[in-house]
Amino acid sequence: MSYLDTTKDIYKDAALTPNVGLCCTTNPIWELPGLKIPKIMQEMNYGCGSTVHPRDLTNNPKILYVGVGGGMELLQFAYFSRQKNGVVGVDVVDEMLEASKINFEEAEKLNPWFKSEFVDLRKGDALALPLEDNSIDVAAQNCLFNIFKEDDLKAAISEMYRVLKPHGRLVMSDPTCEQPMNEALRNDERLRALCLSGSIPIKDYVKLLTDAGFGTIEIRARKPYRVLNPKHYNTEELIYIESIEVAAIKDPMPKDGPCIFSGRAAIYFGDTEYFDDGKGHILFKNQPLAICDKTANALKNLQRDDLYISESTWHYDGGGCC
């Protein structure tokens, strides 16, 4: 049995009997006017963050969500879409699709604005999505891609890139880990399915996205997630795992490399009203400007004594240099 079969079995069981301890079901739930989330959806919130960001969801986007869980994020996406088949939910586990369908019937009772037809549930694999090229505005996955081993992960990212429209965005939440893990942990199929042993460093995660062609990357949040300790896991040292929320945008790849926003900013504090670097970046006096890592390094190399360049905060919420 492959690691993907193990994953299917675990989430089949989680569909039939909600597992409150599986993944990070204690995350705060979006409180939006007129949105009521059924308790069963909250119990089946098998994710490690959120992929629902209102600024991604303007102008009635066509939305794809892969790995439907109990349907909570699909319902949240439908809140912003409110059109027939405006949100497509794809899952490889029949039982999870059926559970979500039942949960949406409950959501209809609690939310007068919601109709189950807003969500198009489809049986499908993240490695071969049942969608046409360039057909989706916003694609999302929550705590799914970390389950995949490298070749499958590359295939899943490539599929998301394929179905997105130009300038569409892939919004993700996944565990990451900066420490090395031993092979015993890496090859533990159950721990991988539980969103633990597939965690990789952020720089490797970002490189997989840019290698797939995404020209802009936004790291929107970086938060504590789990600890693997020697007493309970096959490791000689304590391993700290974080979760990150990332958006990868299908922008053209710049000639000088991707724009990666990791929460850095530049502040000009010189004698004139503003500073212009001659490359499209104008910094007004004492007004912080969000900048990508590439621009941060270029400004640092100027070695000016009237520019402050911050380190990465791992929190980016839009705007800035590009």
Image: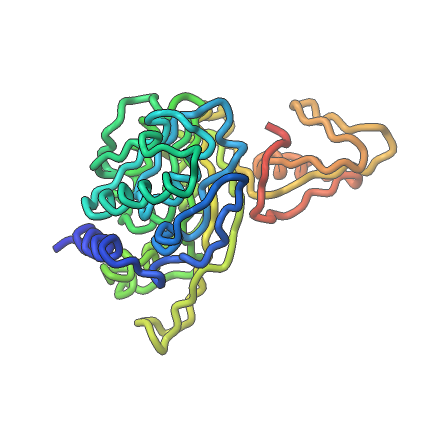
291 relative to 180 in the view: left or right: right
Q: Nearer the viewer, residue 86 or 291?
A: 86
Q: Position of residue 147 (x, y in %)?
A: 29, 51
Q: Is residue 184 above or below residue 168?
A: below
Q: Residue furthest right?
A: 271
- Quarter of the figure with residue 308: top right
116 relative to 57 in the view: left or right: left
Q: Position of residue 78 (x, y in %)?
A: 41, 34
Q: Residue at x 22, y 55 (%)?
A: 16
The answer to whether residue 160 of the structure is visible from this angle is no
Q: Position of residue 160 (x, y in %)?
A: 33, 32
Q: Residue at x 42, y 57 (%)?
A: 177
Q: Position of residue 203 (x, y in %)?
A: 45, 46
Q: Residue at x 22, y 44 (%)?
A: 98
Q: Quadrant of the N terminus?
A: bottom left
- Quarter of the figure with residue 86: top left
Q: Residue at x 66, y 40 (%)?
A: 265
Identify the coloring: rainbow
Q: Quadrant of the C terminus?
A: top right
Q: Is residue 73 above or below residue 158?
A: below
The answer to whether residue 144 of the structure is visible from this angle is yes
Q: Residue furthest bottom?
A: 231
